[in-house]
Image (spheres, grey):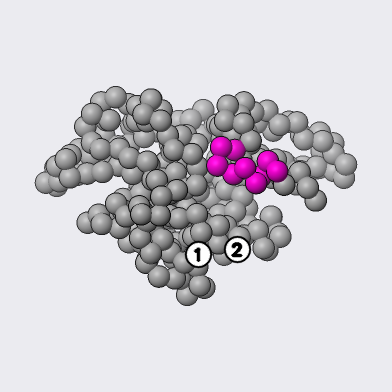
């Protein structure tokens, strides 16, 4: 996971690396690929802050450079016709492990699992076409919180084609504390994690509100991320209600999705 996610990388990765070492895999043969999706690249300072200096000195940590076509490999298409292009480093790896967190996602139902590959290490085109599957339904409440929605299932098909072997996912509570760790098969382990995530994140509301105050933290590095809070909050409003969004947005609207700023407020 990249800087837009609260995944405790500095706790998970050392333990994972130690286990791989015990299995005979040396640190020099391991590469950590930051699953940016189509987010901006992380700086050297941000990588050291997120992963810890000891980890950056232990293994190679690289951004998924999705803007450069030479760094991508085309693997064909899914049965639905979605083109699958993934990071060349991941494609050439002997074993692919995804590390992330399971949080609500407005298009994929829940994050984690196969999302570490799609959109994590895929091309712009692959990502755009899978995400459109959820948008085209125009039924937010059918998609949100549903780990079996069309977009999520297509992401899992992309991950299967890409060769995702194993995942380590965590579920965090509101304080950022780990309440559950799941590992194993990218789909089966993910669904077990979703069961716990639902207890943490899903809430029933007794009635619609006139005003909702929604915090986008910790997904508030930019408006592209923070808008997820709006997506959920608007469904708890009465007609002509108001959402007050609390967020910092240090990166502004979006460093990599300029079209969103240009067209986002149009009907």
Q: What is the span of residues highlighted in magenta in the rendered image? A: 254-262
Picture coordinates of residue 9, whole percent (x, y): 36, 34
The quarter of the picture where residue 166 lies is bottom left
Residue sitting at the far bottom:
79
Number of residues whose C-alpha sits closer than 10 Å to that of mark 2, classed few (under 14), some (14–19) or many (20 or more): some
Tell me the tag on residue 133. Answer: 2
State left or right for residue 50 relative to residue 255: left
Residue annotated with mark 1: 154
Question: Which comes before the other along the chain, label 1 or label 2?
Answer: 2
Circle 1 SS class: helix
Q: Quadrant of residue 128?
A: bottom right
Foreground of the two, 64 or 101: 64
Helix, strand or loop for disc 2: helix
Q: Is residue 253 above or below residue 147?
A: above
**Mark 1 crowd level (few <14, some 14–19, many ≥20, 10 Å Cα):** many
Q: Residue at x 69, y 55 (%)?
A: 140
Mark 1–mark 2 contact, CB under 8 Å? Answer: yes
127 shown above or below 173 = below
- Left or right of residue 140: residue 50: left
Rounded to the nearest angstrom, the CA distance separating label 1 from label 2 is 9 Å
On screen, residue 223 versus residue 56, left or right, reads right
Residue drawn 30% across and 42% down? 32
| Residue pictured at 54% horizontal, 61% vertical | 130
């Amino acid at each position: 996971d990249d800087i837009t996610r609260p995944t405790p990388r500095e706790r998970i990765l050392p333990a994972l690396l130690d286990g791989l070492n015990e299995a005979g895999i040396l640190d020099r043969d391991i590469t950590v690929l930051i699953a940016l999706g189509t987010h901006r690249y992380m700086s050297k300072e941000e990588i050291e802050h997120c992963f810890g200096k000891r980890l950056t000195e232990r293994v190679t940590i690289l951004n998924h450079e999705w803007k450069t076509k030479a760094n991508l490999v085309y693997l064909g298409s899914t049965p639905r016709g979605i083109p699958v292009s993934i990071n060349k480093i991941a494609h050439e790896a002997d074993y692919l492990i995804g590390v992330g967190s399971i949080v609500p996602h407005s298009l994929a139902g829940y994050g984690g699992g196969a999302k570490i590959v799609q959109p994590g290490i895929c091309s712009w085109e692959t990502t755009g076409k899978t995400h459109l599957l959820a948008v085209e339904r125009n039924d937010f409440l059918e998609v949100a919180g549903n780990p079996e929605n069309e977009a999520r299932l297509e992401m899992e098909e992309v991950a299967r084609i890409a060769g995702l072997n194993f995942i380590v996912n965590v579920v965090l509570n509101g304080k950022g504390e780990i309440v559950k760790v799941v590992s194993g098969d990218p789909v089966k382990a993910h669904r077990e994690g979703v069961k716990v995530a639902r207890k943490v994140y899903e809430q029933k509301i007794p009635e619609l509100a006139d005003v909702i105050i929604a915090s986008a933290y910790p997904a508030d590095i930019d408006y592209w991320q923070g808008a997820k809070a709006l997506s959920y909050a608007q469904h708890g409003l009465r007609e002509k209600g108001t959402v007050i969004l609390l967020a910092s947005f240090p990166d502004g609207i979006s460093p990599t999705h300029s079209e969103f700023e240009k067209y986002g407020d149009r009907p």
